[in-house]
Image: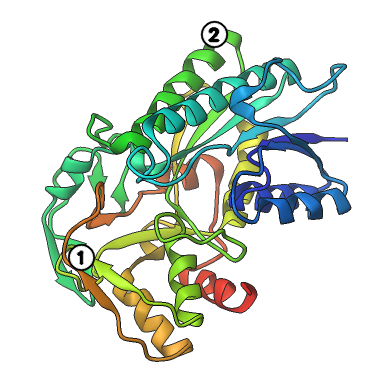
Amino acid sequence: MKRIFITGICGFVGSNLAYYFKSLGFKVYGIDNLSRKGSEKNFRLFKKNGIKVFKKDLSNLTKDNLFNKKISFTALIHCAALTSVLDGTNQNSSDILYKNNILSTLQSLKICKFLKAKFIHISSSRVYNIPEINKLKFKIKNNNFRLQKFKFFGISKKGINENFSTESPISFYGSSKLISENLVQEYCMFNNIPFVINRCGLLAGSGQFYKNDQGIVSYWINSWKNKKKLKYIGFGCNGYQVRDCLHPLDLGNLIKKQINLIGKKKNKLIINVSGGHQSSFSLRELSLWCEKNISFKKIGKQKKNRPFDLKWIVLDNAKAKKLFKWKIKFKKHEIFKDIFLNDN
Protein backbone atom coordinates (compact mmCIF):
# COMPACT_ATOMS: atom_id res chain seq x y z
CA MET A 1 0.00 0.00 0.00
CA LYS A 2 1.20 3.52 -0.78
CA ARG A 3 1.80 5.68 2.28
CA ILE A 4 2.07 9.42 2.75
CA PHE A 5 3.11 11.49 5.77
CA ILE A 6 1.77 15.03 6.35
CA THR A 7 3.12 17.47 8.93
CA GLY A 8 0.61 19.95 10.29
CA ILE A 9 -2.03 17.44 9.25
CA CYS A 10 -4.82 18.84 11.44
CA GLY A 11 -4.62 22.32 9.94
CA PHE A 12 -6.63 23.61 6.98
CA VAL A 13 -4.21 22.60 4.21
CA GLY A 14 -2.97 19.44 5.91
CA SER A 15 -6.46 18.08 6.58
CA ASN A 16 -7.63 18.71 3.01
CA LEU A 17 -4.55 16.94 1.66
CA ALA A 18 -5.07 14.06 4.09
CA TYR A 19 -8.59 13.35 2.85
CA TYR A 20 -7.56 13.89 -0.76
CA PHE A 21 -4.76 11.31 -0.63
CA LYS A 22 -6.90 8.90 1.39
CA SER A 23 -9.48 9.09 -1.44
CA LEU A 24 -6.69 8.07 -3.84
CA GLY A 25 -6.00 4.91 -1.84
CA PHE A 26 -3.03 6.11 0.23
CA LYS A 27 -2.52 5.10 3.86
CA VAL A 28 -2.23 8.52 5.51
CA TYR A 29 -0.08 9.39 8.53
CA GLY A 30 0.70 12.76 10.06
CA ILE A 31 1.84 14.84 12.98
CA ASP A 32 0.31 17.91 14.64
CA ASN A 33 0.64 19.72 17.99
CA LEU A 34 -3.08 20.70 17.83
CA SER A 35 -2.28 24.32 18.67
CA ARG A 36 -4.65 25.80 16.07
CA LYS A 37 -8.34 26.47 16.58
CA GLY A 38 -10.34 23.58 15.12
CA SER A 39 -7.43 21.13 14.98
CA GLU A 40 -8.83 18.98 17.83
CA LYS A 41 -11.98 18.41 15.78
CA ASN A 42 -9.92 17.27 12.78
CA PHE A 43 -7.86 15.03 15.07
CA ARG A 44 -11.01 13.24 16.28
CA LEU A 45 -12.36 12.87 12.73
CA PHE A 46 -9.06 11.43 11.52
CA LYS A 47 -9.16 8.81 14.26
CA LYS A 48 -12.62 7.69 13.06
CA ASN A 49 -11.44 7.58 9.44
CA GLY A 50 -8.34 5.47 10.00
CA ILE A 51 -5.79 8.28 9.59
CA LYS A 52 -2.92 7.92 12.04
CA VAL A 53 -1.90 11.20 13.72
CA PHE A 54 1.01 11.61 16.13
CA LYS A 55 -0.01 14.26 18.69
CA LYS A 56 3.41 15.88 19.10
CA ASP A 57 5.17 19.22 18.64
CA LEU A 58 7.31 18.74 15.55
CA SER A 59 9.76 21.51 16.46
CA ASN A 60 10.47 19.84 19.84
CA LEU A 61 10.87 16.22 18.79
CA THR A 62 13.70 14.51 20.66
CA LYS A 63 13.98 11.61 18.20
CA ASP A 64 14.65 11.65 14.47
CA ASN A 65 11.77 9.30 13.72
CA LEU A 66 8.36 8.23 14.99
CA PHE A 67 8.41 4.60 13.90
CA ASN A 68 9.87 1.52 15.57
CA LYS A 69 10.72 -0.07 12.25
CA LYS A 70 11.24 1.14 8.71
CA ILE A 71 8.25 1.05 6.42
CA SER A 72 8.15 2.48 2.93
CA PHE A 73 6.56 5.89 2.28
CA THR A 74 5.93 7.57 -1.06
CA ALA A 75 6.25 11.17 0.11
CA LEU A 76 6.28 13.54 3.05
CA ILE A 77 4.33 16.79 2.67
CA HIS A 78 5.53 19.51 5.02
CA CYS A 79 2.62 21.82 5.96
CA ALA A 80 3.51 22.54 9.59
CA ALA A 81 4.21 26.25 10.05
CA LEU A 82 2.85 29.44 11.50
CA THR A 83 1.02 31.08 8.62
CA SER A 84 0.43 34.80 9.21
CA VAL A 85 2.58 37.48 7.59
CA LEU A 86 2.19 39.37 10.90
CA ASP A 87 3.88 36.59 12.88
CA GLY A 88 6.96 37.94 14.60
CA THR A 89 5.14 41.21 15.30
CA ASN A 90 1.95 39.89 16.94
CA GLN A 91 1.29 37.44 19.78
CA ASN A 92 3.67 35.04 18.05
CA SER A 93 7.06 36.60 18.80
CA SER A 94 10.02 36.34 16.44
CA ASP A 95 11.47 33.68 18.80
CA ILE A 96 8.30 31.58 18.49
CA LEU A 97 8.07 32.12 14.72
CA TYR A 98 11.62 31.14 13.82
CA LYS A 99 11.76 28.24 16.27
CA ASN A 100 8.51 26.80 14.95
CA ASN A 101 8.99 27.28 11.20
CA ILE A 102 12.68 26.45 10.92
CA LEU A 103 12.99 23.63 13.46
CA SER A 104 9.79 21.99 12.22
CA THR A 105 11.30 21.99 8.72
CA LEU A 106 14.53 20.40 9.96
CA GLN A 107 12.66 17.71 11.89
CA SER A 108 10.45 17.03 8.86
CA LEU A 109 13.55 16.51 6.74
CA LYS A 110 14.95 14.06 9.30
CA ILE A 111 11.70 12.09 9.29
CA CYS A 112 11.68 12.11 5.48
CA LYS A 113 15.22 10.75 5.37
CA PHE A 114 14.27 7.93 7.74
CA LEU A 115 11.18 7.11 5.67
CA LYS A 116 13.17 7.28 2.42
CA ALA A 117 10.40 9.38 0.94
CA LYS A 118 10.16 12.29 -1.49
CA PHE A 119 9.89 15.73 0.15
CA ILE A 120 7.10 18.18 -0.76
CA HIS A 121 7.60 21.57 0.88
CA ILE A 122 4.75 24.07 1.26
CA SER A 123 6.30 27.53 1.15
CA SER A 124 4.71 30.94 0.56
CA SER A 125 4.37 33.77 -1.94
CA ARG A 126 5.54 36.04 0.86
CA VAL A 127 9.18 35.16 0.18
CA TYR A 128 9.09 37.89 -2.51
CA ASN A 129 10.54 41.35 -1.83
CA ILE A 130 7.98 43.83 -0.44
CA PRO A 131 9.49 47.15 -1.67
CA GLU A 132 9.96 45.75 -5.19
CA ILE A 133 6.27 44.81 -5.31
CA ASN A 134 5.05 48.08 -3.80
CA LYS A 135 7.03 50.23 -6.23
CA LEU A 136 5.27 48.66 -9.22
CA LYS A 137 2.97 51.04 -11.10
CA PHE A 138 -0.76 50.39 -10.76
CA LYS A 139 -3.96 51.82 -12.16
CA ILE A 140 -7.45 51.43 -10.72
CA LYS A 141 -9.84 49.54 -12.98
CA ASN A 142 -13.03 47.61 -12.23
CA ASN A 143 -12.63 47.99 -8.45
CA ASN A 144 -9.07 46.70 -8.23
CA PHE A 145 -5.42 47.64 -8.62
CA ARG A 146 -4.00 46.53 -11.95
CA LEU A 147 -0.41 46.59 -13.12
CA GLN A 148 0.36 49.32 -15.65
CA LYS A 149 3.79 48.11 -16.76
CA PHE A 150 5.45 44.69 -16.89
CA LYS A 151 9.02 45.65 -17.78
CA PHE A 152 10.51 44.35 -14.56
CA PHE A 153 12.66 41.27 -13.99
CA GLY A 154 10.56 38.40 -12.65
CA ILE A 155 7.16 39.80 -13.60
CA SER A 156 4.76 39.61 -16.55
CA LYS A 157 1.09 40.08 -17.34
CA LYS A 158 0.56 36.68 -15.68
CA GLY A 159 2.03 37.92 -12.37
CA ILE A 160 5.16 37.41 -10.29
CA ASN A 161 7.29 34.48 -11.44
CA GLU A 162 9.98 32.46 -9.67
CA ASN A 163 12.76 34.86 -10.74
CA PHE A 164 11.37 37.84 -8.80
CA SER A 165 13.57 39.22 -6.01
CA THR A 166 13.57 37.41 -2.65
CA GLU A 167 15.93 39.89 -1.02
CA SER A 168 14.94 41.41 2.33
CA PRO A 169 12.74 42.99 3.48
CA ILE A 170 10.15 40.26 3.10
CA SER A 171 8.75 40.25 6.70
CA PHE A 172 9.78 38.04 9.61
CA TYR A 173 7.34 35.41 8.36
CA GLY A 174 8.63 35.60 4.79
CA SER A 175 12.23 35.26 5.94
CA SER A 176 11.36 32.18 8.03
CA LYS A 177 9.89 30.58 4.90
CA LEU A 178 12.89 31.54 2.75
CA ILE A 179 15.32 30.16 5.34
CA SER A 180 13.28 26.95 5.34
CA GLU A 181 13.47 26.79 1.53
CA ASN A 182 17.27 27.03 1.70
CA LEU A 183 17.36 24.37 4.41
CA VAL A 184 15.26 22.02 2.28
CA GLN A 185 17.56 22.45 -0.71
CA GLU A 186 20.77 21.89 1.25
CA TYR A 187 19.47 18.90 3.20
CA CYS A 188 17.81 17.17 0.24
CA MET A 189 20.74 17.71 -2.14
CA PHE A 190 23.24 16.40 0.42
CA ASN A 191 21.09 13.36 1.28
CA ASN A 192 19.91 12.73 -2.31
CA ILE A 193 16.23 13.22 -1.45
CA PRO A 194 13.95 14.18 -4.39
CA PHE A 195 12.11 17.39 -3.47
CA VAL A 196 9.95 20.24 -4.71
CA ILE A 197 9.31 23.64 -3.10
CA ASN A 198 5.82 25.00 -3.69
CA ARG A 199 5.52 28.77 -3.17
CA CYS A 200 1.80 28.92 -2.52
CA GLY A 201 -0.41 31.93 -2.95
CA LEU A 202 -3.64 32.39 -0.99
CA LEU A 203 -5.20 28.99 -0.24
CA ALA A 204 -8.93 29.19 0.44
CA GLY A 205 -11.93 26.94 0.90
CA SER A 206 -14.47 25.70 3.43
CA GLY A 207 -13.21 24.42 6.76
CA GLN A 208 -10.55 27.10 7.15
CA PHE A 209 -9.78 28.38 10.65
CA TYR A 210 -10.65 31.90 9.64
CA LYS A 211 -8.81 34.86 11.17
CA ASN A 212 -8.39 38.33 9.70
CA ASP A 213 -4.60 37.98 9.40
CA GLN A 214 -4.67 34.60 7.62
CA GLY A 215 -7.54 33.20 5.54
CA ILE A 216 -8.94 36.50 4.29
CA VAL A 217 -11.54 34.94 1.94
CA SER A 218 -12.95 32.68 4.64
CA TYR A 219 -12.74 35.44 7.24
CA TRP A 220 -14.52 37.95 5.01
CA ILE A 221 -17.37 35.68 3.90
CA ASN A 222 -17.98 34.18 7.35
CA SER A 223 -17.85 37.59 9.03
CA TRP A 224 -20.35 38.87 6.46
CA LYS A 225 -22.67 35.89 7.10
CA ASN A 226 -22.46 36.40 10.87
CA LYS A 227 -23.01 40.18 10.68
CA LYS A 228 -19.61 41.04 12.14
CA LYS A 229 -17.89 44.38 11.50
CA LEU A 230 -15.46 44.55 8.58
CA LYS A 231 -13.14 47.30 7.38
CA TYR A 232 -10.86 48.15 4.50
CA ILE A 233 -7.32 48.82 5.71
CA GLY A 234 -4.94 51.26 3.98
CA PHE A 235 -4.33 51.97 0.28
CA GLY A 236 -7.15 54.54 0.15
CA CYS A 237 -9.55 52.30 2.15
CA ASN A 238 -11.49 51.22 -0.94
CA GLY A 239 -10.61 47.52 -0.87
CA TYR A 240 -8.80 47.62 -4.21
CA GLN A 241 -5.86 45.47 -3.04
CA VAL A 242 -5.57 42.22 -5.02
CA ARG A 243 -4.68 38.58 -4.32
CA ASP A 244 -5.26 35.34 -6.18
CA CYS A 245 -6.74 32.22 -4.60
CA LEU A 246 -6.42 28.45 -4.91
CA HIS A 247 -8.47 25.60 -3.46
CA PRO A 248 -6.42 23.04 -1.48
CA LEU A 249 -7.84 20.19 -3.57
CA ASP A 250 -6.23 21.78 -6.64
CA LEU A 251 -2.98 21.86 -4.63
CA GLY A 252 -3.51 18.16 -3.84
CA ASN A 253 -3.94 17.35 -7.53
CA LEU A 254 -0.67 19.14 -8.32
CA ILE A 255 1.19 17.35 -5.51
CA LYS A 256 -0.05 14.00 -6.84
CA LYS A 257 1.54 14.85 -10.18
CA GLN A 258 4.73 16.09 -8.49
CA ILE A 259 5.14 12.87 -6.53
CA ASN A 260 5.14 10.91 -9.79
CA LEU A 261 7.70 13.16 -11.49
CA ILE A 262 10.18 14.58 -8.96
CA GLY A 263 13.40 12.65 -9.03
CA LYS A 264 12.99 12.16 -12.77
CA LYS A 265 13.27 15.90 -13.43
CA LYS A 266 16.79 17.14 -12.63
CA ASN A 267 16.09 20.88 -12.79
CA LYS A 268 15.73 23.00 -9.65
CA LEU A 269 12.11 22.59 -8.57
CA ILE A 270 10.96 25.82 -6.95
CA ILE A 271 7.42 26.41 -8.20
CA ASN A 272 4.80 29.15 -7.85
CA VAL A 273 1.52 27.47 -6.95
CA SER A 274 -1.58 29.64 -7.17
CA GLY A 275 -4.82 30.30 -8.95
CA GLY A 276 -2.95 32.88 -11.01
CA HIS A 277 -4.34 35.87 -12.87
CA GLN A 278 -7.67 34.16 -13.65
CA SER A 279 -8.35 33.63 -9.95
CA SER A 280 -7.28 37.10 -8.82
CA PHE A 281 -9.73 39.43 -7.10
CA SER A 282 -9.81 42.55 -4.95
CA LEU A 283 -11.38 42.81 -1.52
CA ARG A 284 -13.94 45.17 -3.05
CA GLU A 285 -14.84 42.51 -5.64
CA LEU A 286 -15.26 39.97 -2.83
CA SER A 287 -17.55 42.45 -1.04
CA LEU A 288 -19.65 42.87 -4.17
CA TRP A 289 -19.99 39.08 -4.37
CA CYS A 290 -21.12 39.02 -0.71
CA GLU A 291 -23.63 41.81 -1.35
CA LYS A 292 -25.12 39.83 -4.22
CA ASN A 293 -25.21 36.46 -2.44
CA ILE A 294 -25.71 37.36 1.24
CA SER A 295 -26.86 40.92 2.01
CA PHE A 296 -25.89 44.57 1.86
CA LYS A 297 -23.26 45.63 4.39
CA LYS A 298 -21.44 48.86 5.17
CA ILE A 299 -17.65 48.47 5.40
CA GLY A 300 -15.57 50.52 7.80
CA LYS A 301 -12.22 52.15 7.07
CA GLN A 302 -8.77 52.17 8.69
CA LYS A 303 -6.35 54.53 7.00
CA LYS A 304 -3.14 53.21 8.53
CA ASN A 305 -1.61 50.19 6.76
CA ARG A 306 -0.71 47.08 8.69
CA PRO A 307 2.94 45.99 8.61
CA PHE A 308 3.89 44.10 5.42
CA ASP A 309 0.59 44.74 3.60
CA LEU A 310 0.72 44.79 -0.19
CA LYS A 311 -1.43 46.51 -2.79
CA TRP A 312 -1.18 43.53 -5.10
CA ILE A 313 0.34 40.08 -5.27
CA VAL A 314 -0.60 37.63 -8.02
CA LEU A 315 1.61 34.66 -8.86
CA ASP A 316 2.47 33.47 -12.36
CA ASN A 317 1.69 29.73 -12.22
CA ALA A 318 2.81 28.95 -15.80
CA LYS A 319 5.82 26.88 -14.69
CA ALA A 320 3.66 24.55 -12.57
CA LYS A 321 1.16 24.12 -15.39
CA LYS A 322 3.83 23.38 -17.97
CA LEU A 323 6.08 21.06 -15.96
CA PHE A 324 3.30 18.97 -14.46
CA LYS A 325 0.49 19.38 -17.02
CA TRP A 326 -1.58 20.80 -14.17
CA LYS A 327 -5.09 22.15 -14.65
CA ILE A 328 -7.01 24.14 -12.04
CA LYS A 329 -10.53 22.90 -11.31
CA PHE A 330 -11.90 25.40 -8.77
CA LYS A 331 -12.45 28.95 -10.03
CA LYS A 332 -12.59 31.87 -7.58
CA HIS A 333 -16.40 32.13 -7.48
CA GLU A 334 -16.62 28.38 -6.84
CA ILE A 335 -14.24 28.83 -3.91
CA PHE A 336 -16.37 31.70 -2.55
CA LYS A 337 -19.50 29.55 -2.91
CA ASP A 338 -17.82 26.57 -1.21
CA ILE A 339 -17.03 28.70 1.84
CA PHE A 340 -20.49 30.31 1.91
CA LEU A 341 -22.42 27.03 1.67
CA ASN A 342 -20.25 24.65 3.69
CA ASP A 343 -18.88 26.67 6.62
CA ASN A 344 -21.09 26.72 9.71
User: Is residue 179 toward the left or the right of residue 252 in the image?
Assistant: left
At a point 38% along the width and 59% down the height, the residue shown is 244
Q: Residue furthest front?
A: 91
Above or below for 173 versus 192 = below
Q: What kind of residue is marked 1?
A: Phe
Q: Residues within 10 Å of mark 1 (few under 14, many from 20)?
A: many
- Residue 14's disc is none
Task: Choose between 100 and 150: the one closer to the eye.
Answer: 100
Whole-Å distance between the Cαs marked 2 and 1?
Answer: 43 Å
Check disc 1 and report the residue beneath it: 145
x, y (%) of residue 227? 45, 83
Q: Is residue 144 above or below residue 183?
A: below
Residue 275 image offset from top left, x and y in percent? 45, 57
The amino acid sitting under disc 2 is: Phe
Q: Quadrant of residue 71?
A: top right
For this rendering, which residue is in front, 161 or 77? 77
Residue 32 vs 300, above or below: the answer is above
Residue at image mark 2: 190
Dot 2 or dot 1: first in sequence order is 1
Is 205 on the left or on the right of 177, as rendered? right
